[in-house]
Every structure is written in C-alpha cells, then in structure tokens.
Image: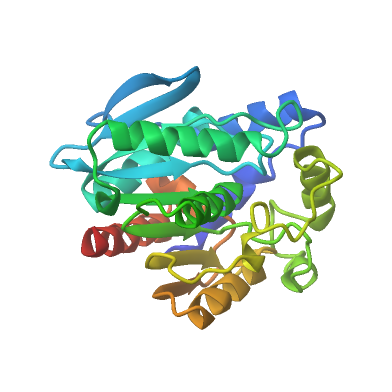
C-alpha cells in the first residue's frame, strides 16, 4: 500500500470541521461515504419493508439464494444506504451474494429500540423472500456492527434460526465508553473521539436504559451459540478495544471468532475501497470468510 492512499482518505475526512447538528452530520457522512459511487455493473433495486427503505444489490456472478444483510454505521444517528452503497455492494461482490441494505430509523428522533426493531423487520423480510437463515450473513460497521450482534442475540433468545455467520467491521460494542483505546488512540483516529461518542449515546439511549444492557452494549451479552464471526478493525481506531474485548468475550463463549487488526487503518476503512487497496483486501478476506460459512 502506498501511504498516500490512507493519507488521502484522512485528508478527505479532515477537509471540513465536524458538522454541528444532526442534519449537517447526516449530510457529511453521505458526502464522504459516497465520494466514490457504486460500480457501474452493480444492479440495485429499491424495496419497501413496511415503510422502511431498503435496497437489494447484486454484482455479476453473485448467488441470489444467499444474502448479506447489512446495517450501516453512523452512531445510530446518521448513515444511509447512499453513504454505504459502495461498501455494501463491493462486499456483496467479494462474497458472491446479493445484499440487502436498510435505512433503519435514526436517533434522536427515533431512540432505542427503533433501530433494533427495524433490523428485525429487515431480517423477517429477507427470510420471507425465501432465503434460508443459514444462507445469510449479517454484517455492519461501527453502530451497525453493534446492531448486528443485537439482532442475532435476539434471534437466539427467541429460539429462531440464526444466520450462517456474522461480519463486524470496526464494531461499536460498548456504550459505557470504557475501552482504554478511546484515550490511547485518540491522537491517531481522525473520526471517532470520546466526547462525540458520548453525544451519540445520549441521543440514542433513553435515560432508563442501562448502558450495559446487552441490546445496546453487546460486549456484555451471553454469546454462547453465536455463529462464526469475523471482526476487522483498524490499528488506528479509538474503538479498537471494542473489537478486541468482544473477540475475547466471544472466544470465551466458545464462538468461532476471527479477529483481524489492520496496521495503519482507521475506522471502517473499507468504505473507501475504490481508492484504498487495504480496503479492497479487507473485503476480499471478508468475502472468503462469508463464502466459507454460507
């Protein structure tokens, strides 16, 4: 990798000051996330999931009988199909499956449990489309990674079939904000800082919800019976320990978990796969993992 590639992404992310207000923040993540659009050979189809916007996508040669259900990041307060389209569609290409991305309701207008309810609606929609649970991988980045775990745990607790595997990209698993790398990686992370995360927590969680509630902080969940899981995280992330501690918890619960820590990489770096070679490699590895387990 040329160092200039990751430097260019850092420059994009720091080219403007952090937006003030939720509307501006949502516009900013769409701006930086869609800097490089989906490839021209991707077929996309808009769907309505009981009032929830969704999008199927499929790359040439992909298998329609298997799917990636993807939840975007954005701290439960921003992010969209548009902001993550390039990431999701290229992940589908690498895994050779079609993808379903959704726009779950965002806080603070729609606090917990709205996002989790929408995730469950998307899962039920996908299953009703005829795809077997074991032929589905559920994945997400950042808050979407936490939402991925919360959904699978909810399915397990209800005794329902669970996905064949899970893919977590820079997941946010601990809303208590207790990870030591929130401090030790603060100087090298261009995106995620503890005061910003505290704002997101306040916007997302009603006051009566315990910060260690496994539905919002899956680090504290009982993970026995969780499906095989791939965790990919950058070495230059304040949320690094959200991944390392979750991997340890999953391993202790006898889960087949693979943890990859990518040198020099920042939060959710495969979003910029169009011009970032490690982003493309990470998606290739995730695709191999998904194909192996589906």
Residue 41 horizontal side relative to residue 180, left or right: left
Q: How is the image coloured?
A: rainbow
In the picture, which quadrant includes the N terminus?
bottom left
Query: Residue 111, how many percent across, how many down?
Result: 73, 34
Residue 134 or 237: which is nearer the viewer?
Answer: 134
- Seen from the viewer's position, the closer of residues 160 and 105 is 160
Total count of labels: 0
Q: Is residue 32 visible?
A: no
Above/below status of 228 relative to 117: below
| Residue at the front extreme, as displayed | 159
Q: Is residue 135 left or right of residue 82?
A: left
Q: Is residue 219 above or below residue 194?
A: below
Q: Position of residue 255 (x, y in %)?
A: 43, 75
Q: Is residue 75 visible?
A: yes
For residue 47, which quarter of the picture? Answer: top left
Identify which residue is drawn at 35% across, 56% down: 283
| Quarter of the C terminus within the rendering | bottom left
Identify the residue shown where x is 44% and y is 63%. 2
Quadrant of res 78: top right
Nearest to the observer: residue 118 or residue 284: 118
Q: Position of residue 89 (x, y in %)?
A: 34, 39
Position of 5 with respect to 266 (left or right) is left
Find residue 69 and report its horizontal and vertical position in percent.
Answer: 38, 42
Q: Quadrant of residue 29?
A: top right
In the depicted structure, whether residue 100 falls above or below residue 238: above
Whether residue 26 is situated above or below residue 88 in the rendered picture: above
The residue positioned 76% from the left and 31% from the top of the image is: 108
Name the residue at 50% across, 78% down: 253
């Amino acid at each position: 990798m040329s160092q200039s590639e990751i430097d260019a992404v850092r420059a994009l992310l720091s080219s403007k000051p952090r937006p003030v207000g939720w509307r501006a923040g949502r516009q900013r993540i769409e701006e930086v996330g869609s800097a490089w659009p989906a490839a021209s050979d991707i077929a996309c189809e808009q769907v309505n999931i009981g009032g929830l916007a969704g999008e199927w996508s499929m790359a040439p040669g992909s298998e329609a009988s298997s799917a990636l259900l993807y939840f975007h990041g954005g701290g439960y307060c921003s992010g969209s199909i548009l902001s993550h389209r390039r990431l999701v569609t290229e992940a589908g290409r690498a895994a050779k499956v079609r993808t379903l991305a959704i726009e779950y309701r965002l806080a603070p207008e729609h606090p917990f449990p709205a996002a989790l309810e929408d995730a469950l609606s998307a899962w039920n929609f996908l299953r009703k489309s005829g795809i077997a649970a074991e032929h589905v991988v559920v994945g997400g980045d950042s808050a979407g990674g936490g939402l991925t775990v919360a959904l699978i745990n909810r399915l397990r607790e209800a005794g329902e079939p669970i996905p064949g595997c899970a893919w977590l990209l820079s997941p946010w698993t601990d809303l208590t904000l207790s990870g030591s790398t929130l401090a030790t990686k603060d100087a090298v992370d261009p995106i995620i800082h503890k005061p910003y995360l505290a704002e997101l927590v306040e916007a997302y969680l009603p006051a009566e919800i315990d910060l260690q509630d496994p539905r919002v902080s899956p680090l504290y969940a009982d993970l026995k019976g969780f499906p095989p899981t791939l965790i990919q995280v950058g070495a230059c992330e304040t949320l690094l320990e959200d991944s390392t501690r979750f991997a340890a918890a999953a391993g202790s619960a006898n889960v087949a978990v693979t943890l990859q820590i990518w040198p020099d990489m920042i939060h959710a770096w495969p979003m910029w796969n169009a011009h970032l070679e490690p982003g493309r490699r990470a998606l290739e590895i995730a695709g191999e993992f998904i194909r192996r387990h589906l």
